[in-house]
Amino acid sequence: MKNVALITGASTGIGRELAIIHAKSQGDLVLVARRKHLLDSLADDLREKYKISILVKEMDLAKIESGTRLAEELIKENIHIQYLFNNAGFGGYGEFIERNISQDLSMIQLNVCCLVELTHAIAKQMTQNGGGMILNTASTAGFIPGPLQATYFATKAFVVSFSQALDQELRKKGVTVTALCPGPVQTEFIDVAGMSKSKLFEGAKTASYTAKKGYNAMLKKKLICISDPPFYFLINYLMWLVPRRTILRIIEKLQRIN
């Protein structure tokens, strides 16, 4: 396999679109998600169109140490990753103390722990093999607190911070890290999080648009990619002028569905 990209959460949404973009550039793929039938369908289509090599791995990355196990499998199979897309993740709606804590712990496991495990193993391999590129799917949620999605927003804040620090450490070793920070995106995340009626997702961008922005930002070795222009202006210029309590009230009002 050549120019291999490992994509987690590749069955739908942004992950699926990243796979299509990379396939168009004649890069080979390792696609990872829970729903094998969706991965197989995507892989068959991309193999036929672009004549590339694709490895499908059915894994639940929300399980403890799943990221480490995935990396170990790839090492045993002598697959060298040049591009790592840490895209898998999910959110969940509701007041924190009213939510099932196991759901939030699974969210942390997938959004944070698995990302850290995979990055640790793959980034080390990249430095040994002369370099590579990492794109971590974070969110504009990583820059603000999120009442009614407290744990999800916190996980994305971790990804934003972690990505920047890691890029500073690894860039001199030939590895770059980009944090993709979209606003609302038209994916099944909305339904999984239970937020289909939230005003926050009005005017959401497509997964294709978001994936292209992130992929191009990675190639340009950008540190942060806020893919939705209004959110770029909000986060970089307006947010710092507004009192924190006001921001909290605004976010809660936008997210509330009843």
Image (cartoon, rainbow, N blue to C red):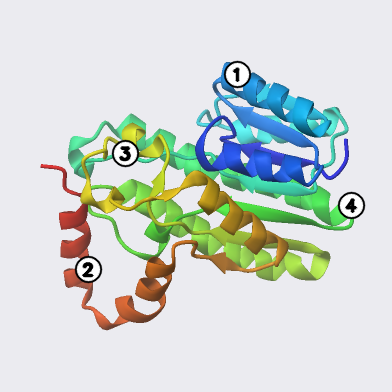
Near-viewer residue (154 or 240): 240
Disc 3 secondary structure class: loop
Measuring 52% from the left and 28% from the top, which residue is drawn there?
63
Q: Above or below — where is 187 with respect to 100?
A: below
Q: Earlier in the sequence, mark 4 or mark 3?
A: 3
* Position of 246 relative to 119 (above/below): below
Q: Quadrant of the N terminus?
A: top right
- Quarter assignment of residue 195: top left
The local secondary structure at tag 4 comes to loop
Mark positioned earlier in the residue sequence (1 or 3): 1
Q: Which residue is mark 3?
A: 92
On the image, numbered disc 2 is attached to which residue?
247
Q: Residues under labels 1 and 4: Cα distance?
A: 30 Å
Q: What's the distance in space between the residues labelled 2 and 3, CA to CA?
A: 20 Å
Q: State the quadrant of the C terminus.
A: top left
Residue 245: mark: none
Work out whether residue 58 can be spotted: no
Residue at numbered disc 4? 129
